[in-house]
Image: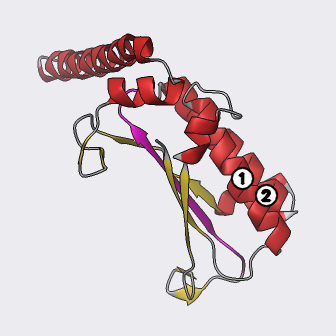
Amino acid sequence: MPMIDVTIPEGTLKPDAEAQLMKELSDILITHEGYSADNQVAQSVTVVFLHRPAAVFVAGKRAPFPWYRIVPSVPEGQYTDAKRRALVKDVTDAVVRADGGKFEDVSPHVWVFPTDVPDGQWGSRGRIIQLPEIHAFLSSDEREHAVGVERLKRHRRVKALEFLEGALDATRKGTD
């Protein structure tokens, strides 16, 4: 059940290019979560919120060119570091295509913030829905619940190991 917040000033893109970008962002997010872009269940719950700032300022002055801010949010456990890097690259490429400019000119103005919503904090239909239930729903197969459980366990193991490595590193540096 991915959500995407997209911030683009009004009139930045041609309407057709903007519509194509919204569709492409949805498809990118769905595929980076591990589902097929033509998964109708995933498509039906992938929501893009388009925000229109009146202006964007850089260093206190109105920006002379468009800035793009994209915040894809997914339940915890969906992204690995490699998936997050690939997602940022694919989203940036999609914005560059929609803008019609060159990568080297547009990409410095594209900010992508992949966000993991901690398990137990994703609410819909008046209740909390956890990753295993979401995974089973998007896969249209209750047996896939176990895949969601494993995905979340793997994610938490990786995060715990990163934390422990950081703590050990800090301890070693403290003894030098």
How far across and how far down the image is residue 99, in percent? Answer: 81, 64
- Residue 117 screen position, x and y as percent: 33, 42
In this picture, which residue range is highlighted in magenta?
65-78
Q: Secondary structure at mark 2?
A: helix
Residue at the spot 63% in from the left edge and 72% down from the top edge: 8
Residue 68: where, in percent of width, then height?
63, 65
Residue shown at the point (26%, 34%) measured from the top left: 119
Name the amino acid type tagged 2: Gln
Query: Is residue 69 magenta-colored?
Result: yes
> Is 176 a magenta residue?
no
> Distance from label 1 to label 2 (Cα)?
5 Å
Quarter holding the C terminus is top left
Q: In percent of the image, x 48 and y 18: which residue is there?
A: 141
Q: What kind of residue is marked 1? A: Lys
- Residue linked to disc 1: 23
Examine the rendered structure and indicate whether residue 64 appears above or below residue 36: below
> In the shown orientation, is residue 76 left or right of residue 2?
left
Q: Is disc 2 surrounded by few (<14), some (14 to 19) or many (20+) residues within 10 Å? A: some
